[in-house]
Amino acid sequence: MAKQDPQIDRFSLAIRLSPLLATLILAALWISGAPSPIPDLRFSAPVVARPGTTIGLRAWQLAEDDAGYTVVASPPVVVELRNAAGMPLASTELALSLVHGREGQLSIPSGLGGPLSLLATAEIDGQEVSVKRTLYVGESIESRLPSGRTVTAFQAYELGPIRASNSGPAVELLDPRVEEGACVPELRCVLSVWVGGQDVRVRLRSLAGVQVEPSSAQPSHGFVRFPIVVSGSEGRVDVEALDPKGALLGAREVRLPLVPGGIVARTSARGDRIHVDWQRLGEPRAVLIDVFQGRRWVRALSLGPENPYFVSPGPGVWRLQIRADLFSDNTAGVSSFVVADPAGPERARAAATSVLADAERRGLDPLALAVLDDALPEASVDDAIAAMFAVPSFDVVAVGSGMSSRLGVDQAVELEQERRRWLAAALIFLIGLIVAAVLLRVELLAQARARRLLDSLGDVASPAPQMPSSGRGLWAFVLLVFVLMAVLALSKRWF
């Protein structure tokens, strides 16, 4: 019996163990790709701020309970403002929210400017976790946070043209607005109609899904306010102007803005405190409140129904966004209010100036222009302010879902895992290449040995023996198997 090539014999054990070695490489690659054990701390803060003001802050942890469901935890969080060298300039410890996570505000010292950094730090399960983000500080810097809501075409505010009647003088002004910015189905909202100084009576006629009580009213200082309730996913009314005898002078169709599942909110200043009144479907519960000046987020707090007050932020025009939880920006209620400045313009003029600041994007508001032209009686200030803020109150300023402590870490882990995938694929392919080369050499040596055997028997005329089909090309099949295993190692789905 012919002896086996001693060079091949040395590789026989390695050939038998090569599948096990490739399997061990894949197993190690799978284990190294396990999820990161770093806690997921989320931190939400503005991008811009002005020196001498405050910024709103929120922080929370996303974790899993024993059943595998995502829950929101509230570990203690400290936020520091640091300069480019990493030196702390200001700090605050966030308070426990009545709804989710932690909340508070941070005072920006006067005289600062340029890019700074915010660092939120928490100790979770004995491990220090932090989130860092950039804050741009400047004297006249403005926020560019996006605003808007996601609604269907049947839930967006739409105002039709005035349809004049031939029975009397033409109606020049018929301007309906939802004071809360949007109605919520099955909750009461107020439709305010501005008619100016015209001697008319206003009547509402439901066209789709609107309950009106009463259906008509006489203007007071140029405004008529109708409490209405919308049922269903669409609300349309006809706003009609009647002469003193009840004859129709003109009408205008309005598609009411709707936010299903949202919050209806109203605010009022009472001394040095602000009262917030909100309604939502279901039992009364605490809500998150974000305070804005323009689009700059300046404060974060939460209120419960048993104590719906917070300290006044001071003179100026302020905007509140009231949310049910951290993840419901789109259904937030919006309400604006004005705190009088003894050294500044009176409240209506301050509100009109604020509304017209968005004129380039929204278009001029005729009511705000009338206020600045002193064309409204003093007694209609509150009604005018509520009507002016109606249209801007439909949009919500998005504060985002927060930056995660896993963001940079997960990216680094993913890059490292990508390097491991390529390394594992290269090792598996190299093993397959070595095994295939040895098998190919075995095949070639077997063919050469067969030829020598025939030559020694003197049967030169006989053709060379053919290798059995079961052994020919085995090296190619083995190499293909290892190539497929190398491709599997590059799969992000499994590794």
Image: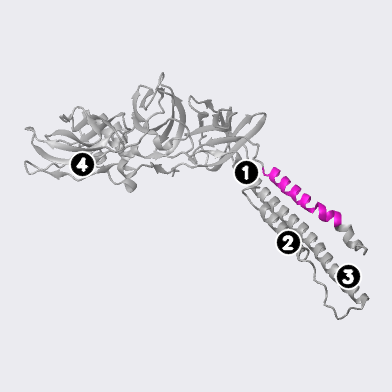
Above or below for 265 versus 425: above
Give the image location of residue 12, x and y in percent: 86, 56
Residue assigned mark 2:
477
Looking at the image, residue 95 sits to the left or right of residue 272; the answer is: right
Residue 30 x %, y %: 69, 45
Secondary structure beneath dot 3 equals helix
Residue under circle 1? 410
User: Toward which corner of the image does residue 258 lie, by quadrant?
Assistant: top left
Picture quarter with the N terminus = bottom right
Please tell me whether mark 2 sits on a helix, a strand or a loop: helix
Measure the alpha-carbon separation of dots 4 and 1: 53 Å
Q: Which one is in front, 6 or 359?
A: 6
Q: Which residues are magenta?
A: 12-33
Query: Is 475 placed left or right of 142 in the picture?
Result: right
Q: Which label's residue is closer to the chain start, 4 or 1?
A: 4
Mark 4 touches mark 1? (CB < 8 Å): no
Residue type, label 1: Asp
Residue drawn where x is 89% and y is 74% of the image: 454
Earlier in the chain: of badge 3 and badge 2, it is 3
Which is nearer the N-term, disc 1 or disc 3? 1
Residue under the image location 84 percent in, 54 percent down? 14
Residue hosting label 3:
449
| Secondary-structure class at tag 4 | strand
How would you rate the neighbour count of disc 3 (Cα within 10 Å): few for under 14, some for 14-19, many for 20 or more? Answer: few
Q: Which residue is mark 4?
A: 253
Q: Nearer the viewer, residue 281 or 108?
A: 281
Q: What is the three-letter code of the residue carrying label 3?
A: Arg
Q: Is residue 317 visible?
A: no
What kind of residue is marked 4? Glu
